Image (spheres, coloured by chain):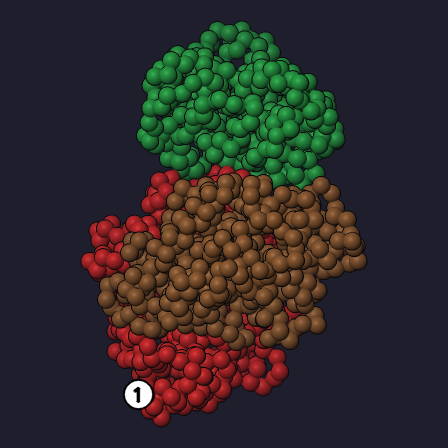
Amino acid sequence: MEHAEILHRCFRCGYCKLPGSYQDLNCPSYLQYRFETYSPGGRMWLLRAWLDEEIPTSARLQEILFSCTACGNCVEHCVFPKFKADVLNAITAGRGELVNEGSVPRRVSDFFKAIHLYGNPYKLPEADRGAWAKGLGLEPYRGQEYLFFAGCAGSYDERGRKMARAVAGLLQDRGVSFGILGALERCDGNEVRAMGEAGLFEEIARHNIAKFLDAGVVKIITLSPHAYHAIRNYYPRFNGIFQVLHYSQVLARMMSKGKDQGADTPLTVTFHDPCYLGRHNQDYLTPRMVLAALPGVELAEMDRARVDALCCGGGGGNFFTDLLGSGPDSSSRVRVREAAATGAQVLAVACPKCAKMLEDAVKAEALESALRVMDLAELVQARSV
Amino acid sequence: MEEIYRELVKIVGERFVSNQPEERFLYSRDPGTMEPHAPDWVVMPNTTEEVQKIVRLANRQKIPLVPMGGGLVLSGLSRPLQGGMVLDMKRMNRILEVNEASSYVVVEAGASQGMLQAYLKKHHPRLKHSIPDAPPIATIGGNVLIHGSGHLSAAGGFHSEMLNGLEVVLPTGEVARIGSCSASPYWFSRSPLPDLAGLFLGWHGTTGVVTKLAIKLFPARPWNDVGIFVIEDPELAPDIIRRLARVQVAEDILAWMSPKPDWAKGFQMINIAYGAETKAELTLKRDLIRESVRPYLERKVGGFMPLPPDMKVRFLEAPQSTLAVFADVNKGGGFEYVGAIMPVELFAPAFRKGLEIAESRKVPYSLGARIVGLAHCMMFFYAYAFNRADQADVRRAQTALEDTNAMVLEMGGIPWKAETPAQKQIIKKMDPNTFALMNRLRAVLDPQGIMNPGNWEA
Amino acid sequence: MSELKYDQKICTKCEKIDCLTRCQHIALDLEEARQEWMKILAGRDSRVLHECLTCYACEEYCPYHNHPFYLIVDRQEELSAWPVPVPLTKQQIAMMAPKGQIVAQKVSAPVINLCSFPMLAGSIQGKLFAGASIIGGNDLFCNIMWLHFAKNSVIRERLPKVINNLMDYYLKVSGVDELICFHDECFGTYTQLAPAFGIEVPFKPIHLFEYLTKKLTELKKEIRPINAKVAYQRPCSNRLVPETQHWVDEIFKLIGAIRPAREYEGENALCCGMVVQAAQRDDRADAIQKRNLDDMAAVGARYCVFNCPMCFMTLKGMVAERGMTPILISDLCRIALGEGFWG
Ligand SMILES: Cc1cc2nc3c(=O)[nH]c(=O)nc-3n(C[C@H](O)[C@H](O)[C@H](O)COP(=O)(O)OP(=O)(O)OC[C@H]3O[C@@H](n4cnc5c(N)ncnc54)[C@H](O)[C@@H]3O)c2cc1C
Ligand code: SF4
Ligand code: SF4
């Protein structure tokens, strides 16, 4: 197994369970399950035991490995400088071993199957992929400056579609030159990769790269930080080299020309850093620049922000497989309680998965009257005259 | 077995009990060198009542019960030597009350060191607790109950001395309160009542499950600094340490001796951390500390390292996150230490003999001493790293630890949070009446002998 | 061992004993100064050897360039009059020891020597340093710092090897004969200390100030004047090379920085205090730092500019507390060129 050589080097000190401030549990799966086995270090030790055949391949082991949300908190906060970068890679590699053995939870294999057959985890026809854009008058991609990549959640999920429409509408309003692939788009593959299905990921990546190159794409704007991450950091391995931006990065540029025009009634907003923009790509500033450019908007940070942000629980495939499970200790619910504690009226997000996870959590926590989940584009639109 | 599992599920809910191989594997071992012992169940209670029910069940069924906090002692104290249940206490992590006026906090035993530190920083920024250098997920309960020490031990002694009171589920299932909280709504001290806290301190979970405890808080000062006094003759250390401690300015005094980096080898560094309300006070305290060791400065045999402020920052970090990283010196992932509580006057032989053992056993080492109180004693540590993936190397470290435990006892020190074999060595040296008394108390408290059996046994 | 290039006759004939009468830290009238200096000449103990704060100033004050400071340091070592506690000195010697990790590397002019501060490499960026080769590390450490520790013997032992390293691993193999010294320490070592110690320097040291002046002149059109008062912290090692001071004025002029007249400037400059702390005289260090900072604040400086990384690290917090921005001189120049800076 790749990275097997670091497994025994984990001391199980548990720094990785926490944010930099140590204030609370910050590994979503450990937060939820509380057994040491569900902590990053626990996974490392279990993987080693499994490779050494000290423990069997069990359903529980699979659940333990696949409930990791790939949020990167462990990578950020492990105190061992010489191997911390690979803590999550080792977990991903462990998932990969289970995938190779064909021993994965049902929901995981269903996910792969759906992607394989439908090109999306929703098992919906690819032909419907562009439906989210209906009525917006968006152009198909044909050599415009940017390709706007909506991704699966943006194409099929109700909450994601709303967000995709807001982002695309805003880009359109501001005269950004872009087109969409519609039915020709396919899953970006990031979750497949994070779930250890390296072969399927490569297939997806190569497919997308070929499609992009055929269409002459040079620059890409992604709705989802997950797609941004995959295209930016993994597509180059298959010679897919594109200039990729997360939509917040485009918004920030549009708005940096001065304070945005529009409503200036006071509004307190807190911002939830998406793992794939923040910890995995170190962009903490851009979304905050967007917020700062909105008149009347005041940012009330959560205690856990930036490198310390608590994941919404939707990463690493859990958005679809939900091996993390629900309940009051699920990280999405803990997260919205934390957001509400800032006194903010709006919980701003920059990822369709976060939007959905946190919106559901707001309902579960009965916080609807106090807290609204809005993505950055929705917020910018709402504040524009 | 199944029946007990179902009973446990009834008590804490299905999500918080496991009898699965994964948990049984992981809870059978800790990061140190001691060999694994698997539990039959791992249980995570959420309330004192749940603990009570679990204890009663264990009692009825005569099932061993081992409380565990962070499981970070390294000496294997929360491995269930005779199987049974491991009680992972970390769900009971609430911070219940901070009394600013009387400077104490009441927490559930599973509250983590890091969580309490962050909570105080946010809600009571003028107060802090004495945090050990253990990784921050270590629990307040686990640490106080083993007589831990930390960043305020020069000011306040062992962490067990900072204990104001506790709530405990006795091995027979009753809940008892100890200290002022047994007769008052306040948790202000253990005096003036008969001090029953001693029934639970230093016992390694053999006398009950502590569910709540109150510990003293200390001023968190806005200005902080650290001086590092360097000498190259360990014989000088006791007097220097005594002088530094007796100024009563230091919050923490920690000596460290390490072969790495190169510039540290052969020297003894003594860190003196202190804080102040104003910059002027900080300067004054620095001068007091400096004045205390004037004769050594004049003889040029010791001095404070000249360090620009940026370079001091890492020495002010609490806990010292770099300590854990010692485990990775040879890419091996493990270390364990003998923490020997002993008088400060034994510093030089303690150091020399430790060095001898480490060098003759060829183990990577790091030595040091945390000073407790005004140099009333010290916790001298001998940390040895090992490669977890290499059994021979683990064994080598184990042997060095065994040698060290024996050497410490021989010298008049006492290994702290000792591994079970070392506990036996201590018992051998112990006044037989003392040990008999321990056994009598234990028999009264725990008639079925279910609590962490295998510990403190001859 | 190389003998100090020093002429005792000059001292015996000297009328003013500037080296001691002008000392900023030991109060001596002319008569006392003469007596103490004669003791030192004769190799006998003197209070000067014990009270000296090793600020290098006497090296500048001697009108005959007769190296009084080096003589003091030699005598301190001979008589074990250690300015710094012995364990600290030994520890520093171990810390700064050559690592033997150097590998030969082709470089091309300009070659910038960061000496033992390779971590400042982030400062060597932008137009000023375009195309420069950067070298540094303990194997290139100029070793001048042992003057503060009464350890000329270490300089004598290590410096020739460092010069060989510079030549063998970089300059000779690359056919380069000029070395730009990022710090005063190195420039002072190679132009002034090495000759005084009889150590040959086979390359041409260039002071960073000269390099910056030249570059700024080339880039003149792109400069946006700083238009702010800037206090300059002169480090001890610049005492060895006062002839470089005019470059500071030229640089200030080029970048439009205003250099207000300060009390503690030029020959009257004050040490940053770090070595005073090493000598365990924190009270003296506090007083020196306070005078220095009060003076900077009194002239209304917005920036305090450094060339010595040690001064920078020692004083930057205090400078910032007083509302001034501490900055390395190269970074200040980069600001004038509209570049962000690293420090
Ligand atoms: C890098 C490193 C640095 C360290 N530095 C320090 C230091 O500076 N100071 C220091 O004191 N220690 C230090 N330690 C040792 C140790 O980690 C700490 O003392 C830690 O606080 C122990 O707490 P824990 O929660 O991990 O206890 P555990 O290991 O879980 O338990 C310790 C003992 O207490 C019992 N116990 C735990 N909880 C309860 C309960 N609720 N009721 C009854 N019994 C209970 C257990 O059965 C066990 O016998 C260090 C360890 C490491 C790895
Ligand atoms: S992954 Fe790193 S931080 Fe986490 S337990 Fe292992 S060594 Fe410690
Ligand atoms: S990536 Fe996140 S969820 Fe996964 S182990 Fe690390 S901290 Fe836990």
Reading the image, the residue beneath label 1 is B1
Q: Colour of chain C?
A: green
Front-most of residues B136 and B216: B136
Q: Colour of chain B?
A: red
> Residue visible at 50% across and 82% down?
B47
Point out residue A59 in the picture as x, y percentages from the top left corner. 34, 73
**Quadrant where the N terminus of chain B is found in the figure:** bottom left
- The chain letter for the residue carrying disc 1 is B
Question: Extreme left residue here?
Answer: B392
> Residue visible at 62% across and 83% down?
B185
Q: Colour of chain A?
A: brown
Circle 1: residue type: Met
Front-most of residues A322 and B30: A322
**Quadrant where the C terminus of chain B is found in the figure:** bottom left
> Residue visible at 71% across and 30% down?
C301
Label 1, secondary structure: give it.
Answer: loop
